[in-house]
Amino acid sequence: MQMPEVRGRLTPGKLLSELTWLRVGGPADWLFQPADVKDLQAFLAGLDGSVPVFPMGVGSNLIVRDGGLRAVVIRLGRGFNGISIQGDRVTAGTAALDAHVARKAAEAGVDLTFLRTIPGSIGGAVRMNAGCYGSYVADVFVQARAVTRDGQIVTLTAEDLQFQYRQSNLPDGMVIFEATFEGPTGDPQELADRMQAQLQKRDETQPTKDRSAGSTFRNPAGFSSTGRADDVHDLKAWKVIDNAGMRGATRGGAQMSEKHSNFLINTGAATAADLEGLGEEVRKKVYDSQGITLEWEIMRVGEPAAD
């Protein structure tokens, strides 16, 4: 198929295992890394409308199946990671890392501290309505700018995205390139101290040294960790996984972490099939033992390997 001319980088057959945190996944038909917004617009406008497009961030919350992805994967890079702050409004390119945005905002006295421990980039955070410690992207979201599948620039409001627990309603093929947030104001030193405490707690309770993709399953019924001392854990994903006896469970090179049982890790040689298969085994055990259906938080895309 004839592909549009680009100023960025267009790579055929790119192995997505090189781009995901879990280090699994077969090839994409194409990987496009646009030079800037105009390059992205021209590419999408010129691309055959029947070709699927998959926007991908830093691959921190993603399993790409072993057979790869029959699509053009669009990955925004250096031209899309700027951060600017005016008053209590923070505008970030969607390739900017969540942690970097939280730090920059804190230096300017804007409280987006909940983003500090979330792995990934701002595009993924908006798409998944990322959150922790009782705060979510939806709480601070003002607007996002995106390029539609036919190359037009549009502005999206919270109403357009219809944020829900760990999800939003972003139309297929639309690529968000910038988002604006408005946070509460705070003392920069206090915000920095809070983020340091959050990082310390995360490192104590989560397998941050292992190859994982963050939380594997959503907390049942939307229960989310607030980090408060009076937090109850009756319906946390990790608790129901523990109750099902699946902490530390393995399949091939995949394991449910011993340190935090809602973290699925690649111990070294896992395939996507190992990881997804173990996740499905956990879901079945939790359902059989407690009647609770766990919903995946990690996005799974692509095709299984051919037999």
Image (spheres, rainbow, N blue to C red):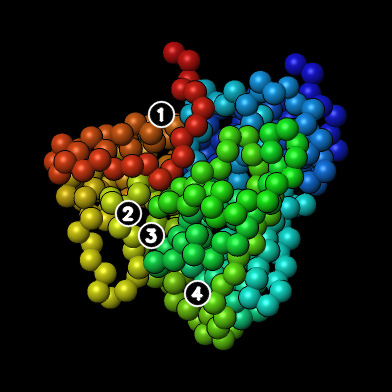
The answer to whether any part of residue 189 appears in the image is no
Instruction: Name the residue beneath numbered marker 1.
Output: 273
Q: What distance separates the C-alpha of mark 1 from that of mark 2?
A: 27 Å
Q: Residue furthest top?
A: 307
The quadrant where residue 46 appears = top right
Identified at 26% across, 69% down, the residue is 231
Instruction: Name the residue beneath numbered marker 4.
Output: 195
Instruction: Name the residue beneath numbered marker 3.
Output: 206
Q: Pointer 2: residues within 10 angstroms few (<14), some, or many (20+)? A: few
Q: Nearer the viewer, mark 4 or mark 2?
A: 2
N-terminal of the two: label 3 or label 1? 3
Instruction: Assign a secondary structure to mark 1.
Output: helix
Q: Amino acid at mark 3?
A: Gln
Q: Is residue 108 above or below residue 99?
A: below
Identified at 85% across, 29% down, the residue is 5
The answer to whether any part of residue 105 appears in the image is yes
Instruction: Name the residue beneath numbered marker 2.
Output: 222
Q: From the image, which quarter does the N terminus lie in?
A: top right
Residue 158 percent across, percent down from the top left: 55, 55
